[in-house]
Image (cartoon, helix red, strand yellow):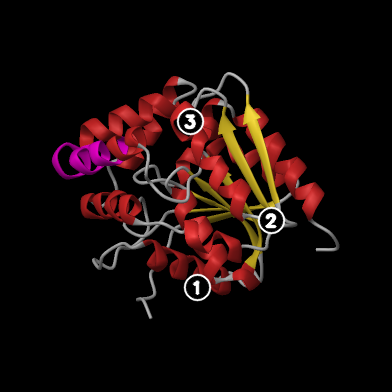
């Protein structure tokens, strides 16, 4: 049993719940453009432990630990079931949660998702993230904030929030993501799954083949003219894909 952590959380709107899980360092602010979905759904944004305004136990930040944190968080908020949307490395938590807590999972959305880190370019990206998290957090904050910005205020907001993070927590999340794999457990996911990829996000396209082989209830959407930073750079088609997926798969909630 992991320690109970106080998480920063925002719950917006009413209706079918959808939880958004951010990648290392970004915090809930990377999903600022998904707040529009609160016009139709209950949008749940939170900071993983050690990130943003959430507490940090100081223990190793493993993927199963973060899944358990989310399970407790939903229980505390009296949310019985939810759609779980993980972005990039945050998709590991979404998949692990769906495997461990199927009774709390309505469906899974992976934006730029993968079940393991086996391709060379993705490995290198994680290794660079680990090195920068340990040695130059400010540079990592600048690079990720710049790559995600839509308008200038996004850059300042995301970088400022990034620098609130615990340095060890970010390095842990990258390190444990590099080592994590749920590929051999994907067959246990019975909830509907949506994969969303940018059509120019070439270095992770190969991972969709794993899902096609192992996940029975799968849909894949490619967003035109998009790289990896879909939640901010391509918020309108991203939100539309989520809306369509929820409408297709939610009955008598």
What residue do we see at 32% from left, 35% from top?
120
Left or right of 211 in this view: 38: right
Classified by dominant secondary structure, the portion drawn in magenta counts as helix
| Residue 6 at least partly seen | no
Task: For label 1, count other residues whose C-alpha is less than 10 Å away and answer few (under 14), some (14-19) or many (20+).
Answer: some
Which of pointers 2 and 3 indicates the residue nearer the eye? Answer: 2
Name which quarter of the figure residue 135 lies in. Answer: top left
Q: Residue 223 or 57: which is nearer the viewer?
A: 223
Q: Which mark is residue 21?
A: none
Left or right of 10 in this view: 253: right
In the image, residue 235 above or below residue 99:
above
- Of mark 1 and mark 3, the one earlier in the sequence is 1
In the image, residue 200 above or below residue 54:
above
Residue behind mark 2: 216
Q: CA distance from mark 1 to mark 2?
A: 28 Å
Residue behind mark 1: 72
Tell me where the magenta segment starts and ends, as one range.
125-137
Which of pointers 1 and 3 indicates the residue nearer the eye? Answer: 3
Q: Quadrant of the N terminus?
A: bottom left
Residue behind mark 3: 229
Q: Residue furthest front?
A: 213
In the image, residue 23 above or below residue 102:
above
What x and y, as percent, mark residue 248? Answer: 81, 48
What secondary structure is marked by label 3? loop
Q: CA distance from mark 1 to mark 3?
A: 29 Å
- Of mark 2 and mark 3, the one earlier in the sequence is 2
- Of mark 1 and mark 2, the one earlier in the sequence is 1
What residue do we see at 28% from left, 35% from top?
124
* Residue 102 located within the stretch drawn in magenta: no
What residue do we see at 29% from left, 29% from top?
142
């Amino acid at each position: 049993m992991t320690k109970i952590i106080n998480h920063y959380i925002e719950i917006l709107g009413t209706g079918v719940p959808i939880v958004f899980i951010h990648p290392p360092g970004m915090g809930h602010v990377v999903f600022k453009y998904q707040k529009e979905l609160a016009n139709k759904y209950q949008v749940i944004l939170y900071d993983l432990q050690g990130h943003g305004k959430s507490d940090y136990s100081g223990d190793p930040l493993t993927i199963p630990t973060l899944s358990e944190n989310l399970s407790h968080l939903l229980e505390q908020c009296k949310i019985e079931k939810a759609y779980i949307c993980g972005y990039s490395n945050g998709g590991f938590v979404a998949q692990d949660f769906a495997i461990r807590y199927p009774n709390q999972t309505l469906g899974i959305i992976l934006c730029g998702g993968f079940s393991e880190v086996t391709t060379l370019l993705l490995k290198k990206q994680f290794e660079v993230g680990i090195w920068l998290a340990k040695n130059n957090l400010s540079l990592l904050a600048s690079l990720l904030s710049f790559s995600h910005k839509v308008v200038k205020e996004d850059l300042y907001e995301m970088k400022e929030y990034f620098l609130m993070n615990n340095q060890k927590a970010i390095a842990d999340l990258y390190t444990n993501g590099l080592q994590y794999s749920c590929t051999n457990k994907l067959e246990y996911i019975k909830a509907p799954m949506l994969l969303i990829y940018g059509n120019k996000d070439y270095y992770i396209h190969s991972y969709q083949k794993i899902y096609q082989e192992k996940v029975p209830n799968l849909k894949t959407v490619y967003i035109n003219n998009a790289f990896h930073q879909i939640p901010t750079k391509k918020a309108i088609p991203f939100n539309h894909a989520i809306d369509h997926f929820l409408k297709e798969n939610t009955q008598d909630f």
